[in-house]
Image (spheres, coloured by chain):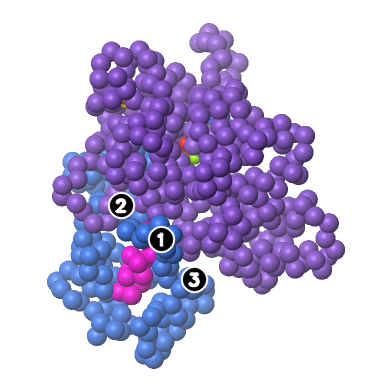
Amino acid sequence: MGIPAPEERLEEYPHQFSGGMQQRAIIAIALSCRPQLLLADEPTTALDVTVQAQILDLLRQINQRDGTGIILVTHNLAVAAEFCQRLAVMYAGQLMELGPAETVISEPLHPYTKGLLRSLPYLVPKGSPLTPIPGSVPDLAQLPSGCPFNPRCDIATDICREEAPPWVKVSSNHAACCWRLT
Amino acid sequence: MTEALVVVKDLKKHFPVQRSLVAKLLTGTKDQWVRAVDGVDFVIHNQETLGLVGESGCGKTTLGRTLVGLYEPTAGSVTFAGQDVFQLKKTNPVAFYRQVQMVFQNPYASLNPRKTVREILSQPLKVRDRYNPKELEEAIQRLLEQVGLNKYHMDRYPHQFSGGQRQRVSIARALAMQPSFIVCDEPVSALDVSVQAQILNLLQDLQVRHQLTYLFISHDLSVVRYLCDRVAVMYLGKIVELGNTEEVFNHPVHPYTEALLSSMPQIKRDPNQKKILLTGSVPSPLDPPPGCSFHPRCIAKVGKICELESPELIACSPGHFAACHRGQA
Ligand SMILES: Nc1ncnc2c1ncn2[C@@H]1O[C@H](COP(=O)(O)OP(=O)(O)OP(=O)(O)O)[C@@H](O)[C@H]1O
Ligand code: SF4
Ligand SMILES: [Mg+2]
């Protein structure tokens, strides 16, 4: 897994490992049973980008060689764009958009997906503020009626506050759950 | 802007490897040391944001903790506004923590789960000043407002907050002492991009309002590029490159920096960009290789000198420093 001096360090406790080394140890455990489906929940969050690239490369090999399906859960849109074939965007426990990763990033349909992409510091000049989505995630026990995203959505209309939105397909493999696409 | 606030001189922090007595008797080896920080020199200018990036485990957190006096240096020194950090912390801890604070890597673990936000924030406030109960209440409220929370959050426990809110609480706790220098250790790594944008806006806002100086540790190079005035690149306990952020991103000099920047995941794919996948494993900080510690993985080695002599961090253009024999004839 690329942890230096494994023999000496076998006897150490997790707190003596750096954040990145802890993560690699966990990935080693998951891969040791050769699964058919691997749920990788933020597998590279604590890692520097060179180790991240190595680990994603390793996961890609496992996917191609053993046919292991991978669900990669991540906050990092750039990692998702580079690694995944398809991308699902979730908000407050519900799926909001699903499509080919590249298309979802370059032509997002759902206002939440658009809001996430607008929040990125990518190409924002130093000193100008970033553009987060206003408000915050609702309490999952008290979801608003209609679309769960409606209180934070800049294009919400009355129906968005009243009824759950339908899935709208814009192409054979790209769809989103939003009234404003109907 | 160019006045030095924090001066780090030949700083080293080594940790003993703790092994059981039996293991020592069996293998017969002596005590070993993890050379987490192994001789770094740099300054942080007043009111700047200095980024610190580098390999996982290269010593960024250790360096940050040593700068705020949480670790005693093994060798070398850190001075803050001309005073030795570790001396100042020992002789006058209150004065010290009024100037230097840290926001930690993990917002889930760094707040005491059994204390309410009121208790978490009263502690540093009481250390700083004498307050009557009403003033204390107002001071807590002001702190919460500064980080975008409000008085309704005062009597909640950390687990009742979202990740972003918790990170706001730890920022409020750091601000309570009204410091001038804050080490932020991956303050946004665990957050989704929208909350990350909120926290980054907050940090910039506070910097302007309170004339803060930041050391910002992060793996997210796009965040570092956006936020930091200068950036330092660390590899195996040493700083290998340091310079203005745009200069380093556009014209990296050290082969490790080149590999790091080329591995940066891109939201828009650039077909011309090739990733330099580093091969070999990260060398052990227990026993760093001789010469340049990057040489076993370097694709740009210039000869025997790389294996024999440790390159010094010297200026390759004004304000841009690198530690690499390539180009240092
Ligand atoms: N208290 C400790 N005792 C012994 N070794 C330690 C201790 N803290 C850190 N180390 C070791 O020092 C080295 C540097 O660790 P550090 O946490 O500073 O790295 P880091 O650059 O912050 O890594 P990451 O990017 O993964 O957070 C690692 O090899 C780590 O295992
Ligand atoms: S000193 Fe030599 S081995 Fe080290 S980075 Fe430079 S070229 Fe590579
Ligand atoms: Mg760290």
Cβ–Cβ under 8 Å for marks 1 and 3: no
Residue sitting nearer the eye, B179 or B109: B179
Q: Say above or below: B240 vs A89.
A: above
Q: Residue furthest bottom?
A: A158
* Number of dots carrying numbers: 3
Q: Name the secondary structure under disc 2.
A: helix
- Tell me, yes or no, if residue A108 can be seen here: yes
Q: Name the secondary structure under disc 3.
A: loop
Q: Which quadrant of the view contains residue A172?
A: bottom left
Q: Mark 1 CB in 8 Å range of ligand 1?
A: no
Q: Which mark is residue A136?
A: 3
Helix, strand or loop for the magenta stretch, by majority: helix
Q: Which residue is mark 2?
A: A79
Q: Quadrant of ligand 2?
A: top left
Read off the chain for label 3: A
- Determine the residue positioned at 44% across, 64% down: A129
Q: Which mark is residue A105?
A: none
Q: Say above or below: B200 vs B30.
A: below
Read off the chain for label 1: B
Tell me where the magenta segment starts and ends, as one range.
A110-121
Q: Position of residue B57 (x, y in %)?
A: 45, 34
Structural crowding at the residue carrying mark 3, measured as other residues with C-alpha within 10 Å and reported as few (<14), some (14–19) or many (≥20) = some
Q: Which quadrant of the view contains residue A97?
A: bottom left
Q: Which residue is mark 1?
A: B193
Q: Say above or below: B3 vs B193.
A: above
Q: Amino acid at mark 1?
A: Val
Q: CA distance from mark 2 to mark 3?
A: 24 Å
Q: Amino acid at mark 3?
A: Ser
| Shown colour of chain B | purple
